[in-house]
Amino acid sequence: MNAIRRAISGRVLSGVEAFFFARRSAWPFGLMRATWAGVALIFLLRQWFDVTAFYSDDGFLPRDLVYLVTRDDWRFSILDYSGEVWYVWAWYITMLVAFACSMLGIAPRTSTIASFLLLSSFHERDAMTLGGGDTVLRNVGFILAIAPGIEAFSFSRLRRHYASWKKTKTLLPPVTMSAWPYRLLLWQMMVLYITSLWWKLLGDMWLDGTAVGAALHHSIFLNWPYGVINEFMPFAAYLTHATVFWEASWLLLLVPATVWKWTNIPVKRLVLAGGLAFHGGIAVFMDVGVFPYVLFAAYLGLLDDGDRAWLKRLIDRRSALPIVVLYDGSCRLCRRSAFGLRIMDTFSHLHLVDFRNAAEKKKVAPHLDEAQLDLTMHILLPDDSVRTGFDAFRFLTWHLPTLWLAAPFLYLPGVSHLGRAMYAWVAQNRQKCAHDRC
């Protein structure tokens, strides 16, 4: 009997440990950090002309009146020490720099913690300027500040990748983290939506189907003329009830993921897709500040390798892979360009080959002349067709998610001529690079 108890106790403890501390990929949290900081930076810059009015003693809420609109307990703001305009602006600029560094991943841990603390200080200084999105912004920032693994998608990580690439032609292993920050973020999202659902069900408008229509006609939040909004009114009741059911669907995430694997139903992806539709609609039709955008950032932290693999399978159906990229390993600029392609190759669509390595070249492109390869970059497609120079780069942009937004612009009239001329000039002068600098 004691042996059985010990076995059960051991399994329970192992299960609890795995639930909180199992290793998982950290790239979703790195992506969330960069997006969260970028969203916050944009909305903070929108306050540029209101900083003095919102946060200094020369504004509408001097420090001796702050107690009228905020709590006294468990409160801290660095702006409580002075209300001078120069003092407020010094910390405001510091906060912008911290968020910019967090977004780019420059000292990501330090800059993210500093961003969260300064953001909280400004929010505590004047609560009258805040909305629900600002609370979510702080909550996500707190989770990022204490979570391991946020150095993914950072400039600091990129530098270490490049050092590894120069030595071994390989990148560092992916960053991993414990599962508990993901659990904390997921629970935060569930509390947010289930609480919202609870308050909706206490009233009548969400049950009788009039809530969305009323919200879209609110004069403060309205983004469009009433004539445009009225065109959507036949769908308002359906959208109202769909919102209620979608918020209730977050309860399904309490069911262990292994159960959903048996049913082959991608519940989490469906719930997140509903959130993209819901908050995307809010962003398009209503001006509610940072709220929808910070939730988009939070959704990134809820992704995992399974979602990445699913997206890869979806994208890989477009064409045969891989694409062989032949580059000049004796050219410093070419090596750095190859490194850039490798970093951006999120879905492993490219096979990079140094054509100066005779054995490697013979395996993939024995029919291509080295003298021709020395003139310009070549890519070899699975159907044995070849593209070179600017045309090769333009083709690759469709396979590199970082460049998807730029890809259509490369097909505008005149861009091809300019791109080929610029590429030819760079290719002709590439050997002038020395010591990794040009």
Image: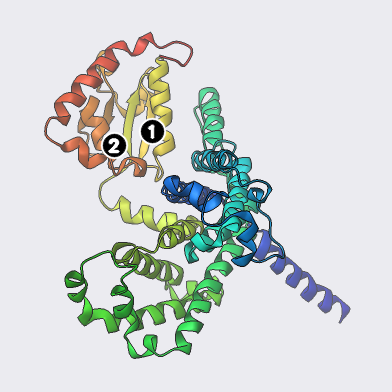
Residue where numbered disc 1 is placed: 341
Q: Look at the picture and state if 255 lies above or below 181.
A: below
Query: Is residue 199 shown above or below 183?
Result: below
Q: Nearer the viewer, residue 381 or 73?
A: 73
**In this picture, residue 274 sits left or right of residue 133:** left
| Residue at figure coordinates x 23%, y 17% from the top left | 424
Q: Position of residue 130 (x, y in %)?
A: 50, 61
Q: Which residue type does callout 1 highlight?
A: Leu
- On the image, the x and y values in percent for residue 19 come to 65, 65
- Tell me if I can see residue 31 in this picture: no
Q: Is residue 137 left or right of residue 48?
A: right
**Mark 1 neighbour class, 10 Å CA radius: few under 14, some 14 to 19, many 20 or more:** some
Reading the image, the residue beneath label 2 is 396
Is residue 207 visible in the rendered image? The answer is: yes
Task: Tell which residue pokes out farthest to the right in this image.
Answer: 2
Query: What separation in Å lies between label 1 and label 2 (alpha carbons)?
Result: 9 Å
Question: Image point 18% across, 24% down: which residue?
Answer: 418
Q: Say if mark 1 contacts mark 2, CB within 8 Å.
A: yes
- Return the x and y of residue 195 as percentages of the image width and height: 53, 78
Counting from the top left corner in percent of width and height, residue 11 is at 74, 71
* First in residue order: circle 1 vs circle 2: 1
- Horizontal side of 77 relative to 12 (left or right) equals left
Please report the residue visible at 37 percent of the width from the left and 70 percent of the height from the top: 274
Q: Secondary structure under badge 1?
A: helix
Q: Which one is nearer the viewer's eye here, 228 or 382? A: 228
Depth check, front residue: 122 or 319: 122
